[in-house]
Each structure stands twice: as C-alpha cells, then as structure tokens.
Image (cartoon, grey):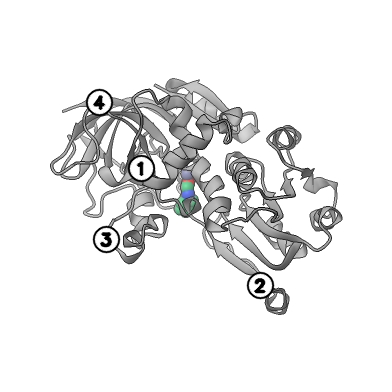
Amino acid sequence: MPTAHAAIITEANSPFTIETITVDPPQAGEVLVDIRAVGICHTDLALATGAFGTQFPAVLGHEGAGVVEAIGEGVTKVKPGDKVLLTFNSCGECARCRADDPSYCEHFVPLNLACMREDGSTRLHRDGAAVSGNFFGQSSFASKAVAHQRNVVKLADDADLATLAPLGCGIQTGAGAVMRSLAAQPGQSLAVIGGGAVGLSALLGGKLCGCAPIIVIEPNESRRLLATELGADHVIDPADGDAAEAVRRVVPSGVDLVVDTSGHLPAMISALGFIASKGKLGLVGVPAVSDATLPMPVFQWLTLGGTVRGIVEGDSDPDAFLPELIAYHAAGRLPFDKFVSYYPFEQINQAVADIHSGKSIKAVLTL
Ligand code: CXF
Ligand code: ZN
C-alpha cells in the first residue's frame, strides 16, 4: 500500500498536522498522482472550519500538480510519468457535462465538496482508520493523491508544476468569470470587487478581453497597487466612502460587467449602484455562511435590464481552458505568478496565517 505524508485537519478549525497516511491504489478510471505542488484556495479554508459539514479527520487541497505514478483500469487520458494539473471533478454523464459545461455538473457538490466518494468510501487511512478524502476529486494537501481521469489535465514534459498549480481552481475561476461566464467584449467596462487571487485573475481576464476601463475595488493598499501594476485603470478603496459614487465618477453611466469575488453581501449590494443598463453581475465569492441572502430590489433590476448570475470555476471546461490559460501565461499575457508566494509543504500553517493576514495573496506549497 503506498504511503504518503499529508496535511491533515483533525477537527474543525484545528491547524494542519503533517502525518503519514496510506493511499489505496487507483481503481477503474482513477489516477494516482505524486503531488509536487499545491495551491491553497479559500474553499480549503472554508471547509477547514467545519461549515460545510466535512467529516474530520480530512485531507483537503484542490489545486494539485504532479506526476502520474499509476493508473487504474480503463484510464486512457494519461500514463505513468506524465505531468498533470488537477482540477475540479465532474460526472461526465449529465446534460451539463455532455454540453462541455462541467463546472455546472449536476453532481458538482457531492463530487467536489462531500470529501468522500459517492459510495461513501475513502482511499485514505491513518493508523488503519478512515480519513476523509476525494475533496475536489483529489485531496492534494498530500504527497500522493488519487484523482479521476476526468479531473486531470496532461501538461507538457517541461511544464513547471509549481508555477501552474493554482490554475486548477483560483486562476481559472477569476479569469474564466470574465472570459467565459460573462463573455466580456472589447471596450466593455469592468469592475472587480476584491483584489485577492480570484479578483486579480478576473482583472487579467478583463485585460485579455480588451475590457476598458477596468476598476478594482479593494481595501488593502498593497493589493490596490498590485492591481494597478497588473493593468487596472482605476482602483478604489471602499473605506474612502461610497464605492458606487467612486465608480460613477469614472464611468458615469455605470459599468457593463461586475465580478464580485469578495463574498461580502454589502459589496454585492453596492454593485446595483454602479452597474450600467443591461449590465451583468457575476457572483463568484462564497459568503461566510451558506444561507446568506441578497435583497433584490425588483423594480430597479427590471428597469435596468440587469443580469445577476452565479459562477463556478469560471465556466471552465478544464481540458480546453487550462491549456489556453497556460499558453497566455507562457506568452506573458496572464502574469498570475506576480501574486503567488511559495512555501515548503511543511509550512502550510504559516502559509495559511499569511493568507489570513493579507501578506500572501495566493500561496503555493511545494513538495
Ligand atoms: C468553489 C466555491 C464554492 C462552490 C463550489 C466552487 N470554488 C472553488 O474553490
Ligand atoms: Zn478553489
């Protein structure tokens, strides 16, 4: 039985502890991956609080990158020795998956957030006892992870795994929200609420689409500076007063597209004050509580002709979209590495502390 070292959450809100686990060999359709790098995303930290009903102990992690070590029966997509990026899982059979729209897979929540297989099983054990795994079909806060062939994307042999790891969730979510979900057109104005990894990726997606002007609303000064460096035309500190007024000083008729990455209800509500006629508001940020509710001033929204929509993983079809993003990065047009900091895997708790303090925007652990 392969063994691995894993960062385990033993109970809700406990720090990660690095421990030895066993990882079952891959079954039909599965791929055992030797993990070399893994990004930390806010959804990892949200589950670590227990707010999503995760059964602990558990191994989280869903921006894994590594090398295929073994494949289960029927796997044709990759072979041992291939470098791969891990991403979200999908069933491959429902109507959405058949339409190459897997981020809205009818089984997205059980396949990605339940931390167990649909039959209730796990591939991970500690001292013979079950450990929850299969988070986003991977649980890649570990030196080995079992994924499904549907949620691995083959990379070139010379790919830099540590650089590409965060594409599997955060970067594709932000960039895809603008490029795919909202299908931004050249010359459309864009406001991004929140300048974390997803928000800055949305900004980069807006640059790729030719959006102008692009406005980033973010309370942290160093993130506002970074947003400017990455091409934001205007940055707004919401602490300086009414953000809607500030946006309208830049674009008096309101912005065409708004992406909320903050998950902060007052920020989402403020968007109604600066969205243009027939504008679109994309909700990407996950609120702190799962039953958070937005008030909907119906008359205003209907006379505006506005659209509000939820966005998961930037509407990514990873087999097509991740290679596209990798090519943009190689061409210097998606410089997301400017907001990544690297930590040895064993320093995962320091990385989490730096995310909470705002010191790190996107942390990637290297193994
Ligand atoms: C998640 C956010 C919560 C809903 C499912 C998708 N994205 C990635 O971390
Ligand atoms: Zn994520």
Q: Name the N-terminal-most of marks 4 and 1.
A: 1
Between the C-alphas of marks 1 and 2, the distance is: 37 Å
Residue placed most toward the observer, 230 or 221: 230
Q: What label sits on residue 37 in the rendered view?
A: none
Q: Name the N-terminal-most of marks 2 and 3.
A: 3
Residue placed most toward the observer, 313 or 233: 233
Residue linked to disc 4: 81
**Circle 1 SS class:** loop
Quadrant (top left, top right, bottom left, bottom right) of the C terminus? top left
* Mark in the foreground, 3 or 1: 3
Q: Count up the numbered dots.
A: 4
Q: Residues within 10 Å of mark 1 (few under 14, many from 20)?
A: some
Q: Is mark 1 within 8 Å of ligand 1?
A: no
* Mark in the foreground, 2 or 3: 3
- The answer to whether mark 3 and mark 1 are in CB contact below 8 A is no
**Circle 3 SS class:** loop
At horizontal 42% and vertical 31% (from top left) the residue drawn is 38
Type of amino acid under label 1? Phe
At horizontal 56% and vertical 64% (from top left) the residue drawn is 309
Measured from the top left, where is residue 359 in percent x and y? 64, 29
Residue linked to disc 2: 296
Residue linked to disc 3: 93
